[in-house]
Amino acid sequence: MAVLSLLLVVLYGLCLLFIVGFSLGQWQLTRLALRAYARPQGLPPPAPAEWPRVTVQLPLYNEQNVVERIVDATAALDYPADRLHIQVLDDSTDATVALAAGRVAHHTAQGLRISHVRRPNREGYKAGALRHGLEETDGEFIAIFDADFVPEPDFLRRTIPFFMADERVGVVQTRWGHLNENESLLTRLQGFGLNAHFLIEQVGRTFAGYFINFNGTGGVWRRTCIADAGGWHTDTLTEDLDLSYRAQLRGWRFVYRPEIVAPAELPAVMDALKSQQFRWTKGAAETARKHLGTMWRSPQPLAVKLQASFHLLNSSVYVVIMLMALLSVPLVFIRTQHREFQLVFQLASVFLVGFVPLVYYYYTAWRLAKPVGQAGRYPGFFLLFLSVSMGLALHNSRAVILGWLGQRTPFVRTPKAGSVGLARRRYRTGGVGPLVVLEGLLAAYFAFGLGAGIYLGDAGLLPFHTLLTTGFATVCYYSIRHSN
């Protein structure tokens, strides 16, 4: 029995060590980002003497709540009409088709070159639609917007000059804005997490010359870069991350401009958030499985290889959190019954200091995104964000493991509600399934661990169990509430 207890303690310690390494990686990116912000910013490249041909691709699938908004927004782009082509890549099977056709007809009558592209089937999902669209356009540069985006009219005039300044620039990615960040607790938490990615991660990686990723939308590709990298592949759920790595391994340079903001809608309901999280985490694991070996065999510098590994394996943190969480309840009893392990637990407590860099990482992003005077709200909001992130660990761990195993799953798009200026009509991704029930049971399991710690007078794991109980209960609650 003592041997089994020791094994559990060692396994828990290894998980904690992984989390510390993850936290230190985020700390490094924070330092790099702050150095980037401190560097004097040069003037943007001048406008070209002649604007190149640009195609704007709008991949759609059953987006009746937002289709008219995105078509109208891209039709309003300030760009020479004879140089612009808009493709509505519509794989829809519902009222979206008629709505899209109506807006396309309207803007065509206004003299805009805009196409309503329909495929016979949805083969390859989003990647297949993008690839199909390329066959029917002559654009030299390809801007991509998901259905929930509302680009500003000057988007192309601000991004295209970066390509003109350097022929090896393959992508210009912009920062996502949030149209409905204050709509609900879920949207505020998502905005908090995404701001860290766009204000810290992308900035830090770009500054150091590490690989970054096209974020799937809100950016522009050089068409020859897409072709040189092998085009859009359909073997992962994150076709954007996959193509990003293939392109950078081929020597293309990516430009990230956080000052150019592409506003978008955040999922306001749990089933939509879960579908998005599943796609992102599983796709990242699939891309890691596909490219890690190639990366390490490449002539890239060691620092680039290490950061690429950290980048591609980021989603693995959910598996580690889930394993730690499951082990933590037995550890409450092991801590009280096996005093000979006290030194091990004391060492583990020292490692908890490794979480400080993670606090610093998110605080820096909060400070960059929020107006002065809101610092006092950060601690509580960070703990709530951390708690709900833990509550998604079961859902996201399943996605990561399926990605590691190479199991194919369909591309489930994130339902958009059109919450800004449109009626609240919502698509569903599913009801209350076994996973939601299990999330509820896990909330009770961690509440038991919390109670056991109080009863046994051992407060060592009380903060962890409080976060886990709150997180899983919150995710379960919203999953049931939003399923109705």
Image: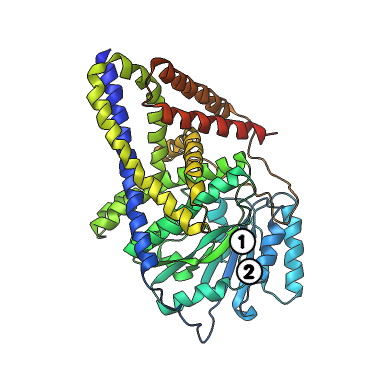
How many neighbours does mark 2 have within 10 angstroms: few (below 14), some (14-19), or many (20 or more)? many
**Do tag 1 and tag 2 residues touch (Cβ < 8 Å)?**
yes
**How far across and down, in percent of the image, does residue 52 sit?**
53, 79
| Residue at horizontal 28 percent and vertical 26 percent from the top | 345
**332 lies above or below 156:** above
**How far across and down, in percent of the image, does residue 401 sit?**
42, 36
- Residue type at numbered disc 2: Ile
**Quarter the N terminus occupies:** top left
Side (left or right) of 114 relative to 402: right
**How far across and down, in percent of the image, does residue 279 sit?**
51, 45
- Label 2 sits on a secondary structure element that is strand
Q: Which residue is mark 1?
A: 58
Answer with mark 1 or mark 2, whichever residue precedes in sequence.
Answer: 1
Please name whichever residue, 317 or 103, is drawn nearer the observer in this view of the structure. 317
**Quarter the C terminus occupies:** top right
Please name whichever residue, 115 or 474, is drawn nearer the observer in this view of the structure. 474
Please name whichever residue, 143 or 122, is drawn nearer the observer in this view of the structure. 143
Q: Quadrant of residue 412?
A: top right
Alpha carbon distance from label 1 to label 2: 8 Å
Q: Which residue is mark 2?
A: 86
| Residue at horizontal 56 percent and vertical 51 percent from the top | 125
Q: Quadrant of residue 12?
A: top left
- Residue type at numbered disc 1: Leu
**386 lies above or below 342:** below
Residue 248: in sight, yes or no?
Answer: no
Side (left or right) of 88 relative to 7: right
Q: Quadrant of residue 128?
A: bottom right
Please name whichever residue, 117 or 2, is drawn nearer the observer in this view of the structure. 2
- Label 1 sits on a secondary structure element that is strand
**161 lies above or below 206:** below
